[in-house]
Image (cartoon, rainbow, N blue to C red):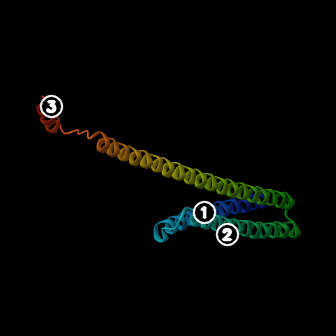
Amino acid sequence: MVVIVEVEVVVVVVVVVVVVVVVVVVVVVVVLVVVVLVTRKSVVVVVVVVIVVVVVVVVVVVVVVIVVGVAVVVAAAAVVVVGGGGGVVVIVVVVVVIVVVVVVVVVVVVVVVVVVVVVVVVVVVVVVVVVLVVLVELVVVVVAVFTAAAAQSVLNVTTDPFDLVARLNIVA
């Protein structure tokens, strides 16, 4: 009977950690959407906000995991003191769960930060390339227009078909 209670405690710890992570992810997404829609700030501001939010989320998740894990370890130790069997196994399992959750959270945060930075860099590069292409096209069009205007004025050439016919009639 003691082992069943201890397994239930470990399951509760895992469920609490999963719920906290899900809530944190939802909060991060909501904060990002609000930042982008309400403030309409630049990409750099959004990236800074993302990194700050992610760091805060990591700290909160790690603190929650450690607090819940310590509570479970204390409860398991109390079971051992009372005389139940298997308390040490629960302490080891809870410590392993805490370490695994903290490592997973840190890895996920690092991956999210890297992905955000890569996306921002790609967006900035694409914007710069598009602006450069538009500028080059604008220069080509301006040069073509001025070249055509200069050629027309120098050669007194017209593209109006009626004017061409009139000139041909005059020449003839």
Rendering coords of residue 45 (x, y %): 58, 67
Q: Amino acid at mark 2?
A: Val
Q: Nearer the viewer, residue 90 or 104?
A: 104
Q: Nearer the viewer, residue 77 or 93?
A: 93
Residue in the picture at 29% in, 45% down: 153
Would residue 157 appear left or right of 147 to someone viewing this image?
A: left
Name the residue tied to disc 1.
Answer: 47
* Disc sitting over residue 171 in the figure: 3
* Disc sitting over residue 56 in the figure: 2
| The quadrant where residue 156 appears | top left
Would residue 117 appear left or right of 10 to someone viewing this image?
A: left
Q: Is residue 157 above or below residue 6?
A: above
Which label lies toward us, 1 or 3? Answer: 3
What SS does tag 2 mark?
helix
Mark 1–mark 3 CB contact (< 8 Å)? no
Which label lies toward us, 2 or 1? Answer: 1
Q: Label 1: how many residues lie within 10 Å, few (<14), some (14-19) or many (20+)?
A: some
- Counting residues from the start of the chain, the first of labels 2 and 3 encountered is 2
Q: Amino acid at mark 3?
A: Val
What SS does tag 3 mark?
helix
Q: Amino acid at mark 1?
A: Val
Q: Nearer the viewer, residue 33 or 83?
A: 33
How many numbered dots are placed on residues in this image?
3
| The quadrant where residue 47 appears | bottom right
Q: Is residue 1 visible?
A: no
